Image (cartoon, coloured by chain):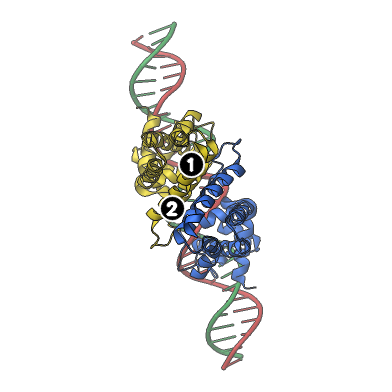
Chain colours: A blue, B yellow, C green, D red
Amino acid sequence: MSRREEIVDAAQGLLEREGPEALTMRRVAAVLGIKAPSLYKQITGKAELEAALQARALQQQATAFAEASDLSEMAAAYRRWALDHPQLYQLLTRRPLDRTLVAAELEAAAAAPLLSVCHNDIDRARALWGVAHGLVDLELARRFPADADIDRVWSVAIAAFSAGAADHG
Amino acid sequence: MSRREEIVDAAQGLLEREGPEALTMRRVAAVLGIKAPSLYKQITGKAELEAALQARALQQQATAFAEASDLSEMAAAYRRWALDHPQLYQLLTRRPLDRTLVAAELEAAAAAPLLSVCHNDIDRARALWGVAHGLVDLELARRFPADADIDRVWSVAIAAFSAGAADHG
DNA sequence: GAAGTCGGCTAACAGTGTTAGCCTCGATGG
DNA sequence: CCATCGAGGCTAACACTGTTAGCCGACTTC
């Protein structure tokens, strides 16, 4: 394993265990037993580190979504992955992808299962991404009241999109 | 106008004109011609300042959504406000509301138009909030490819939820 | 053996939120 | 008229952030 991968590993562990405010160059270095400036021998800066984590998130999503064969399985897989990796999810979705640092195939691979469930209707796939992301994001940001029944909200959303499916094959 | 309101005004202007990284205690103070530590005479810290901006965002949303009388008007109003106030929107939605600092009525007032469009079906309202928020958030984060037709994606989403409306009255 | 690269180091800079402690007005009460 | 007191400003400082410059030791490769 390259030194660069070790750095990204340390960053990922820090982010997932202690949250985004723990993701500092000095703390990443400390995990590896070195000092912050040494990181810059492998990485141009924090932005590149975050882009590497975004790439990992896309990769993990691609494998997590691969098995989903219909809309409700896809939705369940999407939500499950997000709730299992909340920090990685928010890092991935809340800032633009720097497409000079993240391979285009990664983005496509993560999107493929959703697109397939939508029979390649790209607008429908994007609308579904919208619902799933919106519900997950609001849940992670704790914007729903504590007594909200989020499972039922997902059911309503899935039902709405399933009903319209006849129009699209 | 109280000194505290002047501070929040300065913060809002800074955030909306120059983005979140410009929202610094020192810069807010500079707008008012004072130094950062003086802000702490009116405000306990940056968290309270951000909560005050969240409250303003909810207030503005409440009036912006008030006129919407059906689902597609509501969706259009939601998207329009978000695109008109991207920084305020993200500040509002990406962190938990500190409900000790933001009045509960504000949250309810902003949600009321959506709830009314859904004939008080709370789960349906939350599902719709999910779609609208998801689509807006992905658009603001520039996560859709540059060639995506976002208007059409919204149409698909609205159509899906309109079709299911018969089940709910 | 010489050269060069790889990966570490310290010191430093400009910026962040925040606290402590001081001072100067203007108003209010005796 | 003077005393008191609070509101609202100030400077200095602390611990943190990302980042750069410059130096150094060890290992590999001619």
Q: Is residue C24 left or right of residue A114?
A: left
Identify the residue at horizontal 38%, vertical 53% (top origin): B151
Q: Is residue C11 above or below residue B105?
A: below
Which numbered dot is residue B165? 1
x then y, percent, for residue A48: 51, 64
Amino acid at the residue labelled 1: Ala
The mark closer to the camera, 1 or 2, is: 1
Identify the residue at horizontal 57%, vertical 36% (top origin): A145
Dot 1 or dot 2: first in sequence order is: 2
Q: Is residue A98 left or right of residue A117?
A: left
Residue placed most toward the observer, A70 or B113: A70
Which numbered dot is residue B113? none
Amino acid at the residue labelled 2: Val
Give the image quarter of residue C6.
bottom right
Number of numbered discs present?
2
For mark 1, give the secondary structure: helix
On what subunit does the disc labeled 2 rest?
B
Disc 1 crowd rating (10 Å Cα; few below 14, some 14-19, many 20+) is some
x then y, percent, for residue A4: 59, 70
The residue labelled by disc 2 is B156
Q: Is residue A35 left or right of residue B118?
A: right
Residue placed most toward the observer, B112 or C24: B112
x then y, percent, for residue B150: 39, 55
On what subunit does the disc labeled 1 rest?
B
Q: Is residue B97 above or below residue B105?
A: below
Disc 2 crowd rating (10 Å Cα; few below 14, some 14-19, many 20+) is many
For mark 2, give the secondary structure: helix
Identify the residue at horizontal 38%, vertical 33% (top origin): B66
3D distance between C-alphas at marks 1 and 2: 15 Å
Residue A23 visible in this rendered orientation of the protein: no
